[in-house]
Image (tube, coloured by chain):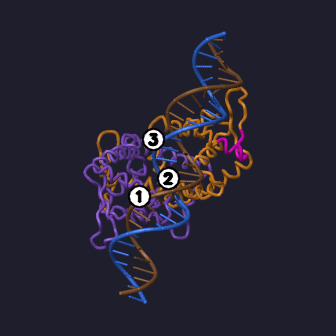
Chain colours: A purple, B orange, C blue, D brown
Amino acid sequence: MQDQPVIPRQAGREPHLFLTDDQLLQGIELMFFAYREFTSDPDRILERFRYGRAHHRAIHFINRSPGITVNRLLTILGVTKQSLNRVRRRLMADGMIISRVGTEDRRERHLYLTESGRALERQLSEAQRRRMRAAYRAAGPDAVQGFRRVLENIMDDPVRQLARSLGED
Amino acid sequence: MQDQPVIPRQAGREPHLFLTDDQLLQGIELMFFAYREFTSDPDRILERFRYGRAHHRAIHFINRSPGITVNRLLTILGVTKQSLNRVRRRLMADGMIISRVGTEDRRERHLYLTESGRALERQLSEAQRRRMRAAYRAAGPDAVQGFRRVLENIMDDPVRQLARSLGED
DNA sequence: TGGCTATGTCAACAATTCTGACATATTATC
DNA sequence: GATAATATGTCAGAATTGTTGACATAGCCA
């Protein structure tokens, strides 16, 4: 995803944007409303399984990085292991994910989606991808670049690095 | 993470983009991580008051539309009145907001921030505005435009209308 | 007057998160 | 080989936020 370096514009001086508090408040509200809409499609699907967003997030990132360890998943999700374990236990009981003992380090557990898990993931992901695709197309390619640049800059550096590292596994 | 550029493909009136699933997944993850970062600053402040995000949202929208009715706030927040009332009661007990009987329709209650409420709002808002301002400046004006366009298009029409109506009150 | 609207409240329940404590297996280090 | 550190798992209790359902009051309107 290294299109362009996101941070350093002109070393020394930043482009001087005049941003009123009202413009910034609008941006804040856009984030609030868009995020809510953005999660509404998967939420409806999850209801049918009586799963919540925590289950969705686990499924998403296990799909994104098959064989991910519990520790790595905890780092990405930013929750406690107790919290994740409740979700993980349920997903394992339901046959959505499986856990394999690590070959190099036998303390580690590597998580994978089962066929059922992949099916659910596709359903959830499809709903969100459809919305993203429609929004991208309606906004146009330049807007997409800008969207990504702003979101990346909203993150602090450690999280930005983490987000960028995800496709690389 | 293969960097597939977002390629504009001409066809018809709307700009057609060729979007891989991977690009869309990246967008989805950007939303997830950016939103989490975006809420982290106010979360830290709220902790000191033992308030949660529900309190923040109420404060935000009451500040944005002083004198807003309970019903309107419920519509914006998309929660039940029981859920909002728990938050409202606490904020009123703490002297952060006040409620005034409507002059035209005496059934309505109009909500306002008190001086304490405004002080807290400024604190919360300042943290988020600072982050937004920094992101906007780093990304540049064109990116901001694109950011807003994509987020608006992520919303379904009713919510988009609602979001747009907010500055107008 | 009767019906609808706006608001408020009580109670019970569910989901998600946290902290803290404790346990086990495995790896790394001295 | 003994000890420390790491990775994982579990139990228990608490806080926040959300839900449904039921019920009550006040005020507007036809």
Residue type for callout 3: Met
Cα–Cα gap, marks 3 and 1: 33 Å
Q: Secondary structure at mark 1?
A: helix
User: Where residue A85 is drawn, which disc sits there?
Assistant: 1
Q: Among all residues in the image, which is located at the extreme left?
A: A115
The magenta stretch spans which residues? B88-98
User: Of label 3 and label 2, which has the lower sequence position?
Assistant: 2
Q: Secondary structure at mark 2?
A: helix
User: Where residue B144 is drawn, which disc sits there?
Assistant: 2
Callouts 2 and 1 close, C-beta under 8 Å: no
Q: Quadrant of the N terminus of chain A?
A: bottom left
Q: Is residue B105 visible?
A: no
Q: Is residue A26 magenta?
A: no
Residue B57 % position (x, y): 59, 46
Nearer to us in this view, A8 or B124: B124
Image height check: is A75 above or below B14?
below
Q: Quadrant of the C terminus of chain A?
A: bottom left
Image height check: is C16 above or below A6?
above
User: Where residue B155 is drawn, which disc sits there?
Assistant: 3
